[in-house]
Amino acid sequence: MTIAGEITLSSDPGGSMKKWREIFAIHQTELASHLKVSSSTISDYEGGRRKNPGIGVISRLVKTLIDIDKSRGGKVIKQLEKDFKQDESKAFESHEFSSGVKAIEMVRKINGNVICLPHKLKEEQIFGYTIIDSLKVILEVPVHEYMMLYGKTPNRALLFRHVENGRSPLIAVKVGRFSTDMKPNLIILHGDFSKKEVDPIAIKIAESEKIPLVTTNMPMEEIIKKLGSFEE
């Protein structure tokens, strides 16, 4: 109902259809095969070249996404079914984009400085971001609840604020992966890194986990405003 509702109410239903297909990591040809339509039909819907899909089309689409995911073990559905109630202490805040955003575009928006794996920024799609208070998460959020940091999908950026040198956030991501089997597509460290260096251990973890690592000293209020343009 959540997926169908978002597509139906979206100002760009085709873009929303594409977003959910990509969240489920399903290729157009695979989806078309299950729906018994041509790949061009899927492409036309997603590109806005066909009139808005009706309830019947959306219903079939959502059911097919779920069925394909279940055949793969249901990882995406399990994530979506979690009750993501954010902590009152504001240890973290999750935001979702209306459609996928290239990681490189997100980094440019916040004047980010790429620390490692710049080539992956052109490959990664970001569907949302979570602003995390590093100290509160490490001290107050149990490891088995780290899944909540990933909102609706792990295909997102984790933006850590109140960062000293980056080691603790990267260790938290690595440890959390063992309990959640999830990792972000991008990690952003917020702080004045013009006066300090990112910890070599943090960089090594990011490289071993194949997660692009970026720093930014843009004021947080401005970052939220810039990234908000992706949510419109």
Image: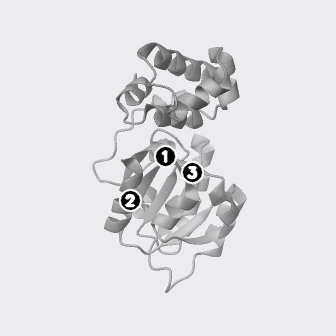
| Residue on which the image places disc 2 | 136
Q: Earlier in the sequence, mark 1 or mark 3?
A: 1
User: Looking at the picture, how far across and down is residue 214, in whole percent?
Assistant: 56, 67
Amino acid type at circle 3 is Pro
Q: Is residue 208 visible?
A: yes
Q: Nearer the viewer, residue 66 or 208?
A: 66
Q: Is residue 3 above or below residue 193?
A: above
Whether residue 9 sits left or right of residue 78 in the image: it is left
Question: Is residue 18 positioned above or below 130 on the image?
Answer: above
Residue occupying the point 34% across, 67% down: 222
Under circle 3, the secondary element is loop
Q: Residues within 10 Å of mark 3 (few under 14, many from 20)?
A: many
The answer to whether mark 2 and mark 3 are in CB contact below 8 A is: no
Check disc 1: other Cα within 10 Å, few if <14, some if 14-19, many if 20+. Answer: some
Q: Position of residue 192 (x, y in %)?
A: 45, 79
- Mark 2 and mark 1: Cα distance apart in space: 12 Å
Q: Which of 105 and 41 lies nearest the eye of the viewer?
A: 41
Tag 1, which secondary structure?
Answer: helix
Dot placed on the residue nearer the N-terminal end, 2 or 1: 2
Few, some or many residues within 10 Å of mark 2 (<14, 14–19, 20+): some
Mark toward the start of the polypeptide (2 vs 3): 2
**Towards the viewer: 146 or 225:** 225
Residue type highlighted by circle 1: Tyr
Determine which quarter of the picture holds residue 26.
top right
Which residue appears farthest toward the bottom when viewing the image?
195
In the picture, residue 5 is in which quadrant? top left
Q: Inspect this view and state whether residue 72 appears.
A: no
Determine the secondary structure under disc 2.
helix
Q: Which residue is mark 3?
A: 184
